[in-house]
Amino acid sequence: MRPADDAPGATEPQAARHEPVVELGWLVAHALDARQRASVQAARRQVLAALEQALPEFRWRMPLVEWDEPLLTPQEEPVALLKEGARQRAQHHWDYALVITPADLAAYSRPQAMAAPSRSLYAAVLSLARIGARAAPTAPETETGAAPPGAADAADATDEALVGDDDSPADPVAVRRIVALVMHLLGDLNDLPHSEAPDSYMHLPAGPAALDAMRHFDEEQRLQLREELQATADVRLEELPRAARQARWRFYLRALWIGREEVASAVLQAHPWQFPFRLSGLSTAALSTLIVLLTAAEGWELGMSQPAGTIVALSLLALLGTCAFIIHRQRLLLHPPRSGPLTEQVVFSNAAVVIVVLLGMLITYLALFGLALTLSQTLYPDTLVRGWAASLEGAITLRHYLSLAGFTAATGIIIGALGASFEGQQYFQHVAFVDEEL
């Protein structure tokens, strides 16, 4: 890693400025060619200038770190780059991290992806391979992606390192589309809703060409962004003098109370209700278990004979146990830098992913419960049920069917968790961390 000067825009005395600081760190992953480097440099100047104009009450800083490793494969997993961005964000105490890569991004919900945000990691990844940039011209051309007057001073000395020695001109198409994507991703990371207006930064682009029309935030979006950023720019808990002396559990509790709205927003962005549909291993194993239990007399006998308290306890243990197993197996928790303290953002990220997995498993449990209850009461005649549950005394009532459904659902999510453990770790982390593919 080669860090750049991390104080762009600091050309005037720090003491003379009292605006809250917002840091959007740019991490250039892998080596870029000269034209890509120039395009990123020009786009970074334009983003900085546009944000300073749209939200002048904040002091914007855009530090840059270059990752000097060669690109070994033409396609990268978004979650791997997002986690590296989150690590750099925690190490450098940025508010957000933007990872830029020349590689194509692996996509799971659409044919291809230009970018992917992660609210829980406070990071986003952007691919230069999918923005439809033009090839380098054979003759010199003017850099039409240049920033407005004054923006160059704000971009800091790292621009010179990023441009390269051959003074290659930036691609104006790439610059324009990088700017639009970065602004859209910033809005996503601050929970701005998508817009139907094609000229809004928050329009959901159907492809690279749609980025050309995305030019601004409307007034309502600016107000919401201002409110979100005001909370982001506040002093973090770990920066308070007493934070270093706090026990970890106290820090977690205080941080969760402070960031309860951010955690809730990150959970909603992750769409935990889609867990059963996106994790085929989980769903297949759980449904297979349900079918086996509902077609075997032993399953009916065992399920209907359990008291209500046992079913409730079994269900709670199954939910908590499967969540802990999945989180550990898929390595979903983040850890603070070895040389640094526990941070608010690590707490927020870990809390969000735990809640996402817990809700995902709860939704799977409820789906299995409802399906088992419906099938057991509609497909099986009373005479057959009585024959299969011969040890029961008295009439078979709704309570027995509820016990059977609870037993089946609890067993189903336990087996489903084992099936989910066979999901690729990258894919499972993609489901847990990536909010959407653009």
Image (spheres, grey):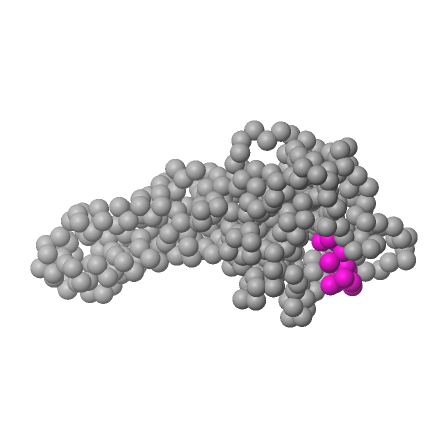
Q: Which residue is at a point 89% across and 53% down the rendered structure image? A: 12
Towards the viewer: 86 or 318:
86
Query: Where does the image place residue 299, in percent across and percent down from the top left?
Result: 21, 49
Main structural element of the magenta stretch: helix, strand or loop? helix
Is 287 within the magenta? Answer: no
Q: Which residue is at a point 75% across and 33% down the rendered structure image? A: 166
In the rendered view, does 211 fall on the left or right side of 421?
Answer: right
Above or below, 424 against 396 in this view is above
Q: Quadrant of the N terminus?
A: top right
Above or below, 277 against 159 in this view is below
Query: Where does the image place residue 260, in percent across and percent down from the top left?
Result: 60, 60
Outermost residue, bottom side: 220
In the rendered view, does 417 fall on the left or right side of 115?
Answer: left
In the rendered view, does 96 fall on the left or right side of 411?
Answer: right
Towards the viewer: 278 or 360:
278
Towards the viewer: 381 or 135:
135
Q: Which residue is at a point 25% across and 60% down the rendered structure image? A: 373
The image quadrant of residue 69 is top right
Stretch in magenta? 44-58
- The answer to whether one can see residue 356 in this image is yes
Q: Which residue is at a point 73% across and 58% down the rendered structure image? A: 50
Is 45 within the magenta? Answer: yes
